[in-house]
Amino acid sequence: MRLEGQAAFVTGGGSGLGAAVCRRFAREGARVAVVDRDPALAAAIADEIGGLAIEADVADAAQMEQAFAAATSLGPLRACVACAGVGPSRKILSRERKPMPLSDFQRVIDINLNGTFNTLRLGAAAMADLEAMEDGERGVVVMTASIAGHEGQVGQAAYAASKAGVMGLALPAARELARHGIRVAAVAPGVFSTPMFETVEPAMRQSIVNGIPWPKRGGDPEEFADMVAFIVANRIVNGTTFRLDGAVRLA
C-alpha cells in the first residue's frame, strides 16, 4: 500500500516509537493524525510534520471514537498504528510479601492491551467502507507488542501479559478482518531508545544492552518506523508478529 495522499492514525504519536512512525508516514506523503494523551507532545509532532494533533486516552472508548471522527477529515484512513503504552515494573510480591495492587495490573492491561484493541476495532470500522485498492485492500493496522511478551523479566508480570495479549490478537484479528480487505500485524521491539526505556535504572539499562548480540546498542525509533513502513507497503504481510531485537533474549 502506498500512503501518499492517504490518512494515517498513530497513537502514542507524541514521543518515542510513535513519533518516529508519524515522521516516516509524513515523509511518504500521508496526512497523519498524531494521537496522544499529552496534548503538548501531540501538537509538537503535528506542527513538525504538518499533521493533526488529537488528545485522547486509548483506553477511553468515547475519546477514541471522537479521535477517529476527527482523523477522517484528513482523508481515507488507510493505516492505523497503535504505539501508546506504559511499562512500569512491579513485583507480584514485594520484599515484605505484600501482593501487587490489582489496580496496578489492571492499569497496564487497560492501556497496553485494551487500548490496543480499542484502536484496532475503531480503525477497522473506519477502513471497512473505504473504496478497495489493489488486491482488494482497504487498510492495515499495526500493533506494538514487545519481546517481553515472549520473555518477561522479573517485575514485568503486567507488562509481559499485556504484550503477549497483543501478539495473541494479531492472527485472529487478521483472519476476521480479511473479508474487509484489512490486514493486521504486530511488531515486538526489543531494547529501543525511548522515554519508556529511560525510566529503567541506568545499570540495568546497560546490562540489557550488553546482552544484545548485534548491533551492540539499543534500537533507534527510526528503525521501528522502518519496520512499520515495510508492513504497510507489503500486502502479503498479515497476521504475524515481527521481533525487532538484534537477536537479544531477555534473561
Image (cartoon, rainbow, N blue to C red):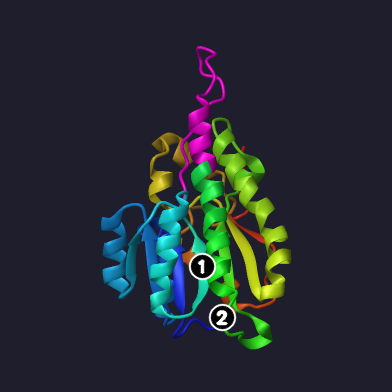
Q: Which residues fall within the magenta stretch?
A: 84-109
Residue 130 badge: 2
Vertical side of 37 occupied by 228: above or below:
below
Q: Amino acid at mark 2?
A: Leu
Whole-percent x and y of residue 223?
49, 65
Circle 1: element type: strand
Q: CA distance from mark 1 to mark 2?
A: 14 Å
- When the figure is inspected, residue 95 is found, relative to residue 100, above or below; the finding is above
251 vs 139: above or below: above
Q: Quadrant of the C terminus?
A: top right
In magenta segment, residue 107: yes
Q: Is residue 133 left or right of residue 115?
A: right
* Residue 168 is covered by the magenta coloring: no
The picture places residue 108, in percent across and down from the top left corner, at 50, 40
Which residue carries the number 1 mark?
Answer: 80
The answer to which of 110 and 46 lies nearer the viewer is 110
Q: Amino acid at mark 1?
A: Cys
Question: The residue tagged with tag 2: helix, strand or loop?
Answer: loop
Residue 26 visible somewhere in the drawing: no
